[in-house]
Each structure stands twice: as structure tokens, then as C-alpha cells.
Amino acid sequence: MRAAVLVEPGRIEMQERPVPAPGPGDVLVRVTTVGVCGSDTHYYREGRIGEFVVTDPLVLGHEAAGVVVAVGEGVPAHRIGERVSIEPQRPDPLTEETRRGDYNLCPHMRFFATPPVDGALCEYVTIGAAFAHPVPETVSDDAAALCEPLSVGIAAVRKARITAGSRVLVTGAGPVGIVVAQVARAFGALEIVVTDLDQRRRTSALSYGATRALDPRVDDPANLQVDSYIDASGAPSAVDSGIRAVRPGGTVVLVGAGAETMTLPVQIVQNRELVLTGVFRYANTWPTALALVESGRVDLDSMVTARFSLDKTAEALESDRTPGNIKAVVDVTDRPGEE
């Protein structure tokens, strides 16, 4: 099979690799679509994200959809031919975290495209059958792949305790911020304020559920009084002002991967008794994600603003620098030059 392999920072090499065989409890998936995530671009450019360091050639990509083409021992054969959205996780079923339902926190997790585990920018992958979620016919391959970032948004909104009538601040109007705004609206938020430095992104946020979009250089979010604050930027200045915007007893959820350490207004957290937490991936989100997409309450298809073939993976990883681009996907089935 073809695989787009990160051989060193800034260099993707197309390689021929053996098609993996599904082990017991696994399915073999022919990959159709892979979304490009900010973590992919970070590994591509820097070769690391915090403590996760690329030391050997690595296949990137963890936002993926495809079709089951073979099953391992213990998996019913009727699953062959199913369109699936891949939840790119392999937790250890015996750890305390997994057994209590927090499998995203499993210390022995093997997660797609996190060193040393290869991801989905290739033609075939294997995954545990329970993590290959059947996709309704009305859900596209693009949307099936983007259920992964949607799951991040669902995890964040759940932790933010957003419900009918909530007032929410979201800092950062990239793909995750836009997804968070959509999920917040679907969960019943009445006011959704999104901030971003980029005018195009602010405009996009308004079309995806935000009730207001602010330039933080002009309108300080700290002047708001919201029930929940979700950071999707990772910017220390955004986090500081966002915390100051939360009413007493409110909730702060950090999603954006930014600085490893930052200074926080601790007295405000204490004096207002704010709940401050983070989101690391997700758990038990895919049924909700697929239901939100199928119902039309979340629109993932229109977020796709750039499309590349597998051979153009390097260009896809650079496309976040294109003004106005929201989400790039790699169409793994596209073979340039073939009819």
C-alpha cells in the first residue's frame, strides 16, 4: 500500500508498505478520507509536541474514515463493507482509567499519529472493531473523518457544562473553535461569543453558530460575564482574559495546545470558585458526534475548504497557512493520473 511518511521535520516521503493484517478483535479499513489536524502540522514542522517526539519515520493523520474490507478473529463477517468513522485510539482494557470509562487517559494508550504509532495517511489501517463506528448513508466520508475533531468539541462542551440558555466564550476560531461553537449551539447555548485575531475566521465563526465574533485587540473578552469559557487557541493572553470573563461558579476548559506553561489569574479562580479543567482527546463521544451530523445540527462538510491527494500530503500540511482555509482533507482514494 502507499503511505505518506514523515521521515524528518519538513519532509514527507511516499513509501510502499505492506498492508497490515487485522488481529483478533480488529477490522482492516481501506482509508478514504483523512482530515489534517494542527497536531499533524506541528509534527511535520517541529518534529514534536511537548513530550511526544518523532524519533523514527511516522505516518501522520488521525482524523479518518473508510470502509471495512477484512475482519480479525472474533469480529462478525457482516461488518465487511461497512463505511466507518475511525476513533483512532487503542487503550489498554486493563488499566484503571479504561475500566472506569476514562479510556482517553489510559497511560498505555496507542493513538494514531502519536509517536511511535503510525496514523492514517496511508491506504489501509487496522483498528479495534469497537472503535470503527458505522456511518449512516447520509453522512459523507469527509464528515465521517471529521467526527474526530467534532469529538474534541463534544468533550469540551460536556466538560464546560453547557446546557440550554448557557452563555459561552470561545477563544480561537480555527477548526476546533468552530466545532465547539456548533456543538455549544446544539447543546442549547443562548449566547456564543467567539474571539480571534483574524477577520476571516471571525466571519466564519458567525456562520457556524457564534452569536458574536470579537477582535480581542479591540473588545476585551474579560469584560464579558459568561457561564463557561473554552479556549481553542492555546494563547496565554487569550486564556488570561477568558478566565476573567467567567462569572462566579463558572467553568473554564482548556483545549488549545499552546504553551507548556503559562501564568494564570489564580486569585480570580479561587475567589470566584471557578472550575478549571482541560480536555485530552475524548471518550464515549462518537455516537453523539454521528447523531449531531446526521440530524444536521452540526455541519462538517462545509468546513472542508481544501482537498489534496495522498501524494500531495506535504501541501495539505502547509495549507493551514492559506488565508481563509478552515479544514483540509486528504482524499486517499484519489490517484492522480488514473481514470
Image: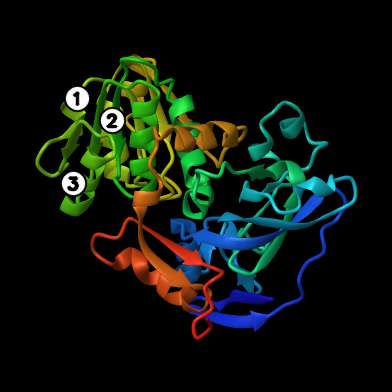
**Disc 1 or 3, which lies upstream in sequence?**
3
- The spot of residue 240 in percent (x, y) is 29, 36
Q: Which dot, 2 or 3, sits closer to the camera?
A: 3
Q: Which dot, 2 or 1, sits closer to the camera?
A: 2
- Residue 183, by quadrant, is top left
- Which residue carries the number 1 mark? 224
Residue type at mark 2 is Leu
Q: What is the spatial separation of the Cα atoms under label 2 and label 1, in whole angstroms? A: 8 Å
Numbered disc 1: secondary structure: loop
- Which residue carries the number 2 mark? 169
Q: Nearer the viewer, residue 187 or 227?
A: 187
Q: Residue at x 69, y 65 (%)?
A: 124
- The spot of residue 324 in percent (x, y) is 24, 59
* Count of numbered tags: 3
Label 1, residues with CA under 10 Å away: few <14, some 14-19, many ≥20: some
Q: Which dot, 1 or 3, sits closer to the camera?
A: 3
Q: Nearer the viewer, residue 317 or 132?
A: 132
Residue type at mark 1 is Leu
Q: How is the image coloured?
A: rainbow
Can you say which quadrant of the picture contains the N terminus? bottom right
Q: Residue at x 45, y 32 (%)?
A: 295
Label 2–label 1 contact, CB within 8 A: yes
- Which residue carries the number 3 mark? 203
**Disc 2 or 1, which lies upstream in sequence?**
2
Q: Residue at x 83, y 36 (%)?
A: 94
221 relative position to 175: left or right: left
Q: Is residue 159 above or below residue 328?
A: above
Numbered disc 3: secondary structure: helix
- The spot of residue 159 in percent (x, y) is 48, 26
Numbered disc 2: secondary structure: strand
Label 2, residues with CA under 10 Å away: few <14, some 14-19, many ≥20: many
